């Protein structure tokens, strides 16, 4: 899974519906299809089974689409047609291992072409190539040893966030506030923008992009997709101004080469000694901001939900976090040693992401014909793997509907069963970053509040 970017693009994929009727779905004549395709059905012409695939997700039980067909056709792989594409849905730990292990051998990641309209620099190559560049560039900033220096910054922003948005409020709506928190963090850590007013300048157009990128991709005046393209142009203009200023600051030693991802992008060349141009950098930063938005925010929101519903779990998290709080001197911020003490809290967060994974799965594309489990997978077919095919599978997690943080003690779940961050060579490099922002949020929210749920929430 590419850092954040993939998760947000997946939201785009899972939100297409009516757009499917605007194009033509090309089927190979039956005589040309390889023999012994996986069992399943392709659904209606043009639409396939997309409506059910999307509607179960919107209703809060995306696993229903998967498990109904696993029971009817195959527990390992079945065929369908979703998002205007012939697809094979891979299910279970063995299938996860197969897909993760064959990246760039039998399969590659798959993106919708509409994404290029939001990120025009990817037209020079492709969204897939741009994602590869990001993966090669980000690791120096996302390793645990590199992220350690940001924990105090995260804690400081979290304290300011709760003071300005939560304190003295009887009721709050968590998800938009969680998005505000994660966006503020991203602006600070990616671009060293910390001033709330400066962050707020991006907020409205950024929300337009976040909404438009998961809308029907029709570029006509007044449509959400069209507004998203316009908003991306506005933000890109602002980012280009920030980039130009940073280049001057670096040249005059007013900025550090290692202070954030923006400086790193400006000073790092590829294998051919080429540096990214300013537009490319603006698009990369925009992609990171978008990708780091809804996924971590969703995880945080569900943490708040489950802690409200499970007082015994809340009490254990509270006990652990207050022991850390009591060890701090007044004004002292969290550090790496404190994070290492949050073992139970992280087990709770992991169990939250098992039951309510921020990303429901991911798509690949077959780059050659191959056979899996005796079934033929044609070149060009899309392959979908689902977190819920293992996360809610009793063979992988006994009593899967039970909230049990102890599943993550010791060696934890079996390999390829717990996959909220993907796996294999495409394991999300932002996993550690997500862990830190979730734990810093948990520390501050339980230290300040005890709460109860007022509104019904799916899951």
Image: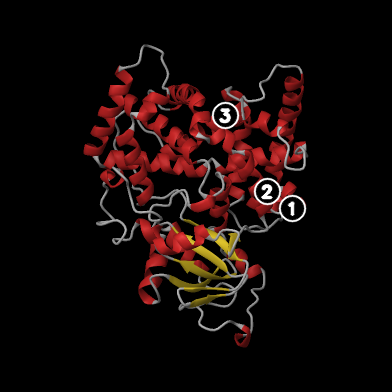
Question: Who's the residue at 61% across and 49% down the image?
Answer: 212
Using residue 400 as the reference point, say whether residue 300 is left or right of it: right
Residue 281 horizontal/vertical position (percent): 71, 38
* Residue 169 visible in the snapshot: no
Residue, far left: 312
Residue 283 horizontal/vertical position (percent): 69, 41
* Residue 305 visible in the snapshot: yes
Q: Nearer the viewer, residue 40 or 307?
A: 40
**Marks 3/2: CA distance?**
21 Å
**Marks 2/1: CA distance?**
7 Å
Between disc 3 and disc 1, whose residue precedes?
Answer: 1
Residue, far bottom: 31
Question: Who's the residue at 72% across and 32% down the image?
Answer: 266
Between disc 3 and disc 2, whose residue precedes?
Answer: 2
Q: Any mark on residue 125, and which?
A: 1
The residue indicated by pointer 2 is 130
Residue 168 horizontal/vertical position (percent): 38, 23
């Amino acid at each position: 899974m590419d850092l954040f970017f993939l998760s947000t693009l997946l939201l785009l994929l899972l939100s297409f519906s009516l757009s499917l009727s605007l194009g033509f779905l090309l089927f190979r004549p039956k005589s040309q299809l390889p023999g012994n395709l996986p069992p399943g059905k392709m659904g209606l012409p043009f639409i396939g089974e997309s409506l059910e695939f999307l509607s179960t997700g919107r209703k809060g039980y995306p696993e229903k689409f998967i498990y109904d067909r696993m029971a009817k056709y195959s527990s390992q792989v079945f065929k369908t047609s979703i998002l205007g594409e012939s697809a094979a849905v891979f299910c279970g730990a063995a299938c996860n291992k197969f897909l993760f292990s064959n990246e760039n051998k039998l399969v590659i990641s798959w993106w919708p072409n509409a994404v290029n309209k939001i990120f025009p620099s990817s037209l020079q190559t492709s969204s897939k190539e741009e994602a590869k560049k990001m993966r090669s560039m980000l690791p120096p900033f996302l390793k645990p040893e590199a992220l350690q220096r940001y924990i105090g910054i995260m804690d400081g922003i979290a304290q300011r966030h709760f003071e300005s948005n939560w304190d003295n409020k009887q009721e709050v709506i968590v998800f938009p506030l969680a998005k505000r928190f994660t966006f503020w963090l991203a602006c600070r850590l990616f671009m060293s923008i910390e001033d709330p007013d400066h962050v707020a300048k991006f907020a409205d157009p950024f929300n337009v992009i976040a909404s438009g990128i998961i809308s029907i991709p029709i570029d006509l005046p007044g449509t959400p997709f069209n507004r998203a393209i316009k908003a991306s142009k506005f933000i890109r203009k602002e980012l280009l101004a920030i980039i130009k200023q940073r280049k001057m600051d670096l040249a005059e030693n007013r900025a550090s080469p290692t202070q954030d991802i923006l400086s790193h992008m400006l000073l790092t060349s590829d294998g051919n000694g080429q540096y990214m141009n300013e537009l490319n950098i603006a698009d990369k930063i925009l992609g990171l901001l978008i990708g780091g938005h809804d996924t971590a925010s969703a995880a945080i929101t569900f943490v708040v939900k489950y802690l409200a519903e499970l007082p015994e779990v809340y009490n254990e998290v509270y006990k652990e976090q207050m022991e850390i709080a009591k060890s701090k001197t007044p004004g002292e911020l969290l550090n790496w040693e404190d994070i290492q003490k949050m073992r139970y809290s992280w087990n709770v967060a992991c169990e939250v992401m098992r039951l309510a994974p921020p990303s429901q799965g991911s798509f690949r594309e077959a780059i050659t014909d191959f056979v899996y489990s005796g079934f033929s997978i044609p070149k060009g077919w899309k392959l979908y793997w689902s977190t819920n095919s293992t996360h809610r599978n009793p063979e992988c997690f006994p009593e899967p509907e039970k909230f049990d943080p102890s599943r993550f003690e010791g060696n934890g779940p079996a390999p390829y069963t717990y996959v909220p961050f993907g796996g294999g060579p495409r394991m999300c490099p932002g996993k550690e970053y997500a862990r830190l922002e979730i734990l810093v949020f948990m520390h501050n929210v339980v230290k300040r509040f005890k709460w109860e749920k007022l509104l019904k929430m799916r899951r």
